[in-house]
């Protein structure tokens, strides 16, 4: 049986997503155990504690969309996007717990989120991630994301540890007007 990918729509769905995000933070702290300061500063800069209290507002209509992958009633992963402007959205909080990694869940969630963003009329999807998350970065590149200039004002000390990427969602002529490589 394949994973069912569905849009979050209930309080329970957003609570499940919040648990995934909390597990993701713990996973990142383990991945960056020599540089936990980085994780604490990034999530602090992103106001994650506040975000977790309002996921439906941040990543639900009209500001975004949250997708969950489930099988046999069990949450196997999640991802969201939020609107940056009328043409651009940002992928956020992709996480697949370790016990489900390597099964293509992350790729299926990304593909579904990208299609949802296209269907919702966005021309570009952006993301930022930690440089040590090499498996995720490789997957994003396979999907078609490419590195771009920072699009959020992070503290200077964090920038060397971050990778910023973007993916045109619309036809190339339309999308190029909104990608950072083409902006002057």
Image: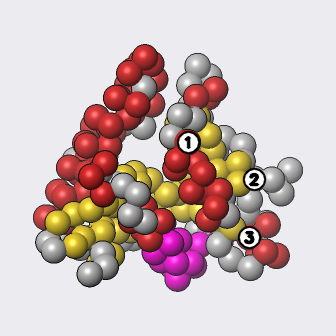
Name the residue tied to disc 3.
Answer: 175
Q: Are marks 1 and 3 in contact (CB under 8 Å)?
A: no
Classify residue 50 by image quadrant.
top left
Q: Is residue 133 above or below residue 78?
A: above
Q: CA distance from mark 2 to mark 1?
A: 23 Å
Spot occupied by residue 114 in the image (x, y as percentages of width and height): 53, 71
Can you tell which of label 1 and label 3 is closer to the viewer? 1
- Numbered disc total: 3
Name the residue tied to disc 2.
Answer: 180
**Magenta-span inclusion, residue 118:** yes
- Left or right: residue 19 versus residue 36 is left
- Of residues 48 and 17, the one nearer the viewer is 17
**Magenta-span inclusion, residue 85:** no
Q: CA distance from mark 2 to mark 3?
A: 10 Å
Q: Secondary structure at mark 3?
A: helix
Majority SS type along the magenta span? helix
- Of residues 31 and 161, the one nearer the viewer is 31
Classify residue 62 by image quadrant.
bottom left
Q: Which sits earlier in the primary sequence, circle 2 or circle 3?
A: 3
Name the residue tied to disc 1.
Answer: 134
Q: CA distance from mark 1 to mark 3?
A: 26 Å
Span of residues in magenta: 110-123
Q: Is residue 93 above or below residue 39?
A: below
Spot occupied by residue 21 in the image (x, y as percentages of width and height): 29, 47
Describe the colour scheme in one phrase. secondary structure
Q: Quadrant of the N terminus?
A: bottom left
Other-residue count near label 1 (Cα within 10 Å), few / some / many at <14 / 14–19 / ≥20: few
Spot occupied by residue 175 in the image (x, y as percentages of width and height): 74, 70
Q: Which sits earlier in the primary sequence, circle 1 or circle 3?
A: 1
């Amino acid at each position: 049986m394949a994973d069912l990918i569905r849009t979050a729509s209930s309080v329970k769905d957003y609570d499940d997503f919040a648990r995934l995000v909390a597990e993701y933070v713990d996973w990142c702290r383990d991945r960056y155990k020599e540089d936990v300061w980085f994780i604490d500063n990034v999530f602090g800069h992103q106001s994650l504690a506040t975000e977790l209290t309002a996921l439906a507002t941040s990543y639900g209509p009209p500001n975004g969309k949250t997708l969950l992958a489930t099988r046999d009633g069990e949450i196997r992963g999640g991802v969201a996007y939020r609107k940056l402007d009328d043409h651009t959205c940002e992928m956020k909080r992709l996480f697949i717990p370790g016990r489900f990694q390597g099964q293509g869940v992350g790729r299926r969630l990304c593909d579904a989120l990208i299609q949802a963003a296209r269907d919702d009329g966005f021309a570009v999807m952006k993301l930022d991630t930690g440089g040590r998350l090499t498996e995720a970065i490789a997957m994003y590149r396979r999907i078609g994301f490419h590195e771009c200039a920072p699009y959020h004002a992070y503290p200077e000390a964090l920038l060397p540890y971050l990778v910023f990427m973007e993916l045109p969602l619309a036809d190339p002529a339309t999308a190029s007007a909104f990608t950072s490589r083409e902006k002057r």
